[in-house]
Every structure is written in C-alpha cells, then in structure tokens.
Image (tube, helix red, strand yellow):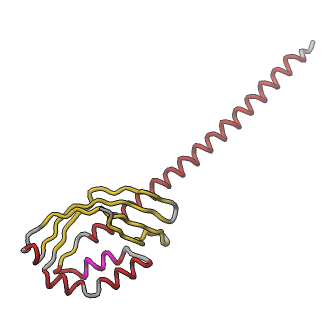
Amino acid sequence: MKRPGLTVVLYAVALLLGCAVVFGGVLIQQEHQDRQRAAAEQARYGDVLTAARTEIEAFVNIDYTNAQESIDAVAAGATGDFAKQYDTSTKDVVKILTRAKSVMEGKVLWAGIVDSDSDSASVIVATTGTVANASTDNKPVARQFRIKVDLVREKDAWKTSNVEFVG
C-alpha cells in the first residue's frame, strides 16, 4: 500500500529545505561581502585621516633652525598644483624664517572627513599651537587654524592636492 500523498509532502519539504539552504548561503555570502567592503572603507578612512594629519602637522610645525627639513616634510606629502605652488612659495621662506627667528609649533586637535571616494577626499583639520618670532618679541602667541585638506590617491599613498584655511 503506497501513500502518494506522503511522497509528495516529503518532496515538498525537501524542496523547501533546499531552497532555504540556498537562500541562507546567499545571505551569508552577502554579509561576508558587506563586511569586507566596510573593512576596506574603514581602512581607507584611516589612511586618509593619517595622511591629512601628517601633512598638517608638518605644515604647522616649522623652526627657523631647521626650516628646510620642515619644508621638505610638507613637500613630501604634496602633489599636483599644490606641490608646485608650495615649491614656488618656499624658495625664499628659509631666509625669511631665519631673519625673523620664527618658530611655529602646533598639533592637530581633530580631523574629520567631509567627502571621500576611492581616489579623493576632503578633510577638515583643527589645530592649536603657538608662533614666536621677532614681531612677538620671540614670545609664543597662541594660534588656532581650521584647514580644509584635499587629498588624492596616487599609487598606494594619499597626497595633498590643496590646502585652504577655512577659519
């Protein structure tokens, strides 16, 4: 005595279980890909923030006794028009800094990404520090800057393509 209804029910259950396994596998794969994308994006954000902080730290720390070293540190992170403008504008800076006995010390308080994609980013950086030179009687005077930094990805590094004081 065969039960055709039972066979149909078992086939239906097996089919539903098979569909559930396939559906679950697809969901697991999507979750894995989402996590990989999120990890890659977090790594990119970290790289962008590190590059912006490094560039601005170099930018707000300059001492007339080793001015060329400070200038070279900024130039190392620069690219494109910003690199050209910076190179052109720093030709006589060492003489001016030495004559004024200028020392600028600063640090980045915070940095935040305003816009970012896989090969460009804009970051706002807030700094605090001091400037001492002949016009301040070589006494440190407080300075705070808000700077917008535009970066582009060149090979495996983020380089500064523009620096703009915003506040």
Question: Within the image, what quadrant is residue 17 found in?
Answer: top right
Query: In the figure, 167 relative to 30: above or below?
Result: below
Query: In the figure, 105 relative to 102: above or below?
Result: above
Could you say where residue 100 lies in the image, as x and y percent from the top left?
14, 81
Residue farthest right in this picture: 1
Residue farthest front in this picture: 167
Q: Nearer the viewer, residue 99 or 18?
A: 99
Query: Overall secondary structure of the magenta stretch?
Result: helix
Q: Which residue: 19% across, 68% down? A: 105
**On the rendered structure, is 147 left or right of 161?**
left
Query: In the figure, 9 relative to 95: above or below?
Result: above
**On the rendered structure, is 24 left or right of 159?**
right
Q: Is residue 5 magenta?
A: no
Could you say where residue 79 lies in the image, as x and y percent from the top left?
42, 76
Quadrant (top left/top right/bottom left/bottom right) for the N terminus: top right
Q: Which residue: 71% across, 37% down? A: 22
Q: Say how many tags the image has.
A: 0
Q: Which residue: 19% across, 71% down? A: 104
Could you say where residue 67 lies in the image, as x and y percent from the top left?
22, 80
What span is in magenta?
Answer: 68-74
Q: Is residue 70 magenta?
A: yes
Q: Nearer the viewer, residue 89 or 118?
A: 89
Could you say where residue 162 lies in the image, as x and y percent from the top left?
40, 71
